[in-house]
Amino acid sequence: MQHRTQYISTRGGLAPTEFLDVLLSGLAPDGGLTVPADVPQVSAEVLESWRPLSYPELAAEVIGLYATDIPSADLRELTAAAYGPERFPAPVVPLRSLDDVAPGLGLVGLSEGPTMAFKDLAMQFLGQAIPYALARESRVLNILGATSGDTGSAAEHAFRGRPGVAVFMLSPQGRMSAVQRAQMYSLTDPNIHNLAVDGVFDDCQNLVKAINNDAAFKAEYSIGAVNSINVGRIAAQVVYYVWAWLRASDHLQADATSVPAAGTGVDSFRIDVAVPSGNFGNIYAGHLARTMGVPIRRLILATNENNVLDEFFSTGIYRPRSSEQTLATSSPSMDISKASNLERFIWALLGAEEFQRRWPELERTGVLDLSDERDRLREQFGFVSGTSTHADRLAAIRRVHTATGTPIDPHTADGVTVALRLMEPGVPTLVLETAKPDKFPETVAEALGAPQPVSTAVQQLLDADQHVVNIPCDPERLREIIGARALRR
Ligand SMILES: *Cc1c(COP(=O)(O)O)cnc(C)c1O
């Protein structure tokens, strides 16, 4: 019988059990996160049978293990649209060797989508899957979010022109990069509403909270979110870990004209994957891929100066920090001190019962001391970690540029820094490229001592007309705008 994936809440309360229902809900009603009750498994034979597939075809297979309530023909249509030529060049996720930087080092190109960052890979799937889920129930959804840059633009580009969905995105006036602003504000689709708030990112988030706390308004206007805890995003992110292993091992399969010597064939091929991390969404998908049986030896977690996660993986002590204690760094998308997806991993680490016994300590004391589990983080779960600083970031951008002639973005540079520090001879080490350098030209220019030429695509984007409504930091004004523009059933 085919495996059916059911979902449960980390906190043990009632929660929707089917993928399509989980997709449309945020936190579980008990405040927990939904996780697959059992992680689906892939055998070496199945993995090998996926080798000839294109990225959209592979996505349908992998996501299909998590979305067992979507018929496979439908899922193939959803992934063909999400990862098709209108949005991504083939092969969607290119691998690039960095052997000239360090033998065995490589980059997994996750930033080929419309907003030049890895969030497109998950969000474009949601842009197809959410309208599909809504249509089954004749529902509409008004997505309300706050962004400091990457998530908002990825969401807008995924949902622009999609049926049954509107996006209301709050951004802090004058606090995003020129490219990020242009990516959002240049859109002209009638279902995309850019609202620039007179305030900082926290003010934007507080406005979203004010609306979310108003249950009647929320229900009347079908308000929802697509944040980094969304299960659909996680499932879509598992795909590129499988893809990366397949592509990194292609040469072994192609060379296998004679029987390989013991320990040299594809059967014993393992990779290390380095992941620039903030909310623990990207690397949690790597943990799922590894648990499924994809031959990933270690997951190398890289943080910037906001190194709560490095602290957790090296000591076993999780001590989230407040927004006042969070530094503004030159890899801004990782300026996070409370990793919203970590709860899912700690649930897997401790098991349901122990998790539910220990987790309340975090709420009570602000700290969760799991130092007893420290060795298992590495030995059983394959996690190692490190911190990268501004100086490390600049050095990594320079080093890759010198060796290859092309720069990398500051977040990817954090991944490269920590990968270079922790990689081991003989194990291919793939760094996930989480954004294009064009998106963060100031830091790249600082590293290389001169501004880089602006690509034609980026110049066109910067030159386009912008559409944004400026609003004060006032929930009443936000209610008025949503009231006037929201989609209604
Ligand atoms: C979101 C983001 C990250 C962090 O990913 P998480 O899933 O939050 O850990 C890293 N780099 C870039 C460029 C991002 O946009």
Image: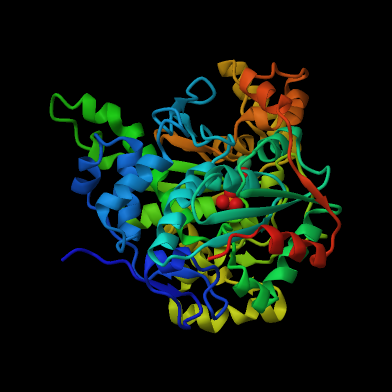
Q: Please say if 193 is above or below 442.
A: below
Q: Residue 401 location in percent, x, y?
A: 62, 20
Nearest the viewer among 355 and 485 is 485
Q: Residue 112 location in percent, x, y?
A: 51, 32
Q: Residue at x 60, y 74 (%)?
A: 219
Q: Please say if 150 is above or below 381.
A: above
Q: Residue 38 location in percent, x, y?
A: 33, 68
Residue 412 picture quarter: top right
Nearest the viewer among 83 and 33 is 83
Q: Residue pushed farthest left?
A: 258
Nearest the viewer among 78 and 274 is 78
* Colour pattern of the rendering: rainbow
Q: In the drawing, does residue 92 fall left or right of residue 456? A: left
Q: Can residue 270 be seen in the rendering of this structure?
A: no
Q: Can residue 169 be seen in the rendering of this structure?
A: yes
Q: In the drawing, does residue 28 fall left or right of residue 175? A: left
Nearest the viewer among 263 and 97 is 97
Q: Residue at x 34, y 63 (%)?
A: 39
Q: Residue at x 68, y 66 (%)?
A: 319
Q: Residue 347 location in percent, x, y?
A: 48, 71
Q: Please say if 227 is above or below 50.
A: below
Residue 391 picture quarter: top right
Quarter of the image where the N terminus is located: bottom left
How many numbered dots are placed on residues in this image? 0
Q: In the drawing, does residue 137 fall left or right of residue 451? A: left
Q: Please say if 99 is above or below 333.
A: above
